[in-house]
Amino acid sequence: MIPPVYSEDVLAPEENALLAAEPSVRRIYGENVADEIYSDLSTTQYRDLVAKFTENGSRYIFDSTGATQGANYLARNYLIQELESLSNGRIEVNLVGAHYNIVGRLPGYLPGDNPVIVISAHYDSAERSSGANADGSGIASVLSLVRMLSKYDWPLDIYFIAFNSFFTFIPRSGSPEVADLFQIQGIEILTMYNVDSILLPDPDGEPDELIQIGYSQEGPLVLTQYHEGQYWAETVAMISNNHGAGVVTPVPHTSFGLWGGSDHYSFFEDGFTGITCLYESGRNADGTTSTPADFWNNADFDYFLGREATTAIGASIAFTMSRRYGAPTTLEYEFSNGPGRFELVKFVISTPTTVNISSRWFGGSSTFYLVGPDFNLIEVYTSNNASAWEPTEVFNELLTTKGLYRLYIENTHYGSVGYDVSITYDSDIDGNGVLDKNEYWLPQSYFTADQDNDNLSDADEIFLGTDLNSEDSDSDTMDDKYEIDMGFDPNDAADGNEDADGDGLTNAQEYSGGLNPFSKDSDGDKIDDLWELTYGLNPLVDDAALDQDNDGISNLEEYEAGTDPTISNLGLGPMIWLSSPLLVIIPIVGYFFIRKKNKEMLS
């Protein structure tokens, strides 16, 4: 963690926490919320952020001394306030270096030193330019992702960085300060998404190549492995295709025109891996950079691309942190295909693995094509029909080449067909030779240790957010394991006083008595639990046929009659008429009727 270096107008985290109560956030483990994130940003929201950020004009400074005043100073304080506000106080904000780089950290819930994810852009602009595209577009991405990602509790730290002094007399002066500090602090970067100008597409470009994501093919000293660069770029391309408009294309740094010219390069120079940079495909046609024309309402700017690049980054982060210990990677997609149409699903292979592809569909014939990273056709599957209820195995293929694979689904039917496709495979995103399902960002010992002996491993407790040293984390008298098994919240004491089955017994009372909290009649003897407890019967034993008070009336009959099973109903006199139902009254009335008839006959 970077030590705090607070300047004027910057609140320490404990002070900021007083500004707003932190809302409930969802802890993410083994859950892929990529779709949620992809739908959590509109083009209008994104454009408005660019307009707001650039409204004070040029943020240019000649050197670091200019950062203490003017639009650069105002922009910095605005960003600090937005990082704190959009994250509801969850982000720890620091200023780093003489150039006032802003570094915000959204803490992950895992203990120990784990790799981090970085999202970055620069907040200064060229002289006499408001910098809407360079780099208001990148800052809008950062702020959007702050809002979207802060709604969740992630396993790993996420850093949001706004570099300063990109356009200074000595270009790119700010980012080396942050890169050097990360190196000094020993912070390991899993992947970095640096966002530069992204609003101008190549007018002659292909629809799936409007945003480029550059990655390193070789490191400063040695050849970089696939997972240290290419994997991360291809994952963003996969997510962009499967969840969005598919506008992102991976580009090796040797063909990426901005590789040595943006802030990510400082981290690359310092030996960090997993570094990527997103940039517009229309770079050669962009005449707005460093000019007054770089204004937010420029008609040539395509804000939809900014939105797509931003959500692709966020959804890629969600996909990366959806890993579950012991489980392979699984992708699931639902879509409808018109007659004669193709649907494309992409997936990234990072280690030799057998890929299982299955699908449910109904409505007619379909053909599936499995295509490799080099666009080589691997396999074809055709079916005239399939079940809409049971999945059909389409492919079960051993794939050994790392890269971005494509699954084309062709509807050869005369009508529209709906598909539910599942792709399962093993991954090894860090390339250490251990499958991701066999390791997590936790020491292996956490999965076998159980400090509080509550039958939940320490790893499970961390994933759940429960107390590793207490069997009852929320002190509601129900053990954590029991609450998990029953679907209650082990971190919410309120559910102890709730009554899930509406039988008059709280969930905590049901737990204490070993009863079923979702049934009014735990033993199935047709007598409610509360009634049995009230009259000393056993709600876990079928005692319906027994006669507790030996009055010839079973416990079940007493329950149905509403009488007390502990007090005999015989010999109570006429008052029994007022309290006993027909079951008791009929024999008594019958007795008096027969007696009267006998008297009449004798007379």
Image: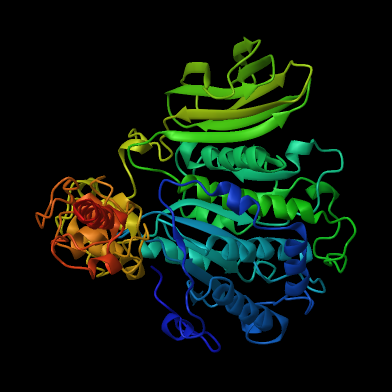
Residue 490 appears at what percent x and percent y? 31, 61
Quadrant of the rendered image containing residue 123: bottom right
Q: Nearer the viewer, residue 41 or 542?
A: 542
Colouring method of the image: rainbow
Q: Is residue 172 above or below residue 232?
A: below
As drawn, which residue projects farthest toward the left? 550
Q: Is residue 468 above or below residue 54?
A: above
Any part of residue 86 in sight = yes
Position of the N terminus, as image quadrant, is: bottom left
Q: Nearer the viewer, residue 119 or 495?
A: 495
As drawn, which residue projects farthest toward the right? 299
Left/right placement of residue 330 relative to residue 245 reads: left
Q: Nearer the viewer, residue 328 or 159?
A: 328
Residue at point 22% right, 68% down?
574
Q: Nearer the viewer, residue 401 or 165?
A: 401
Position of the C terminus, as image quadrant, is: bottom left
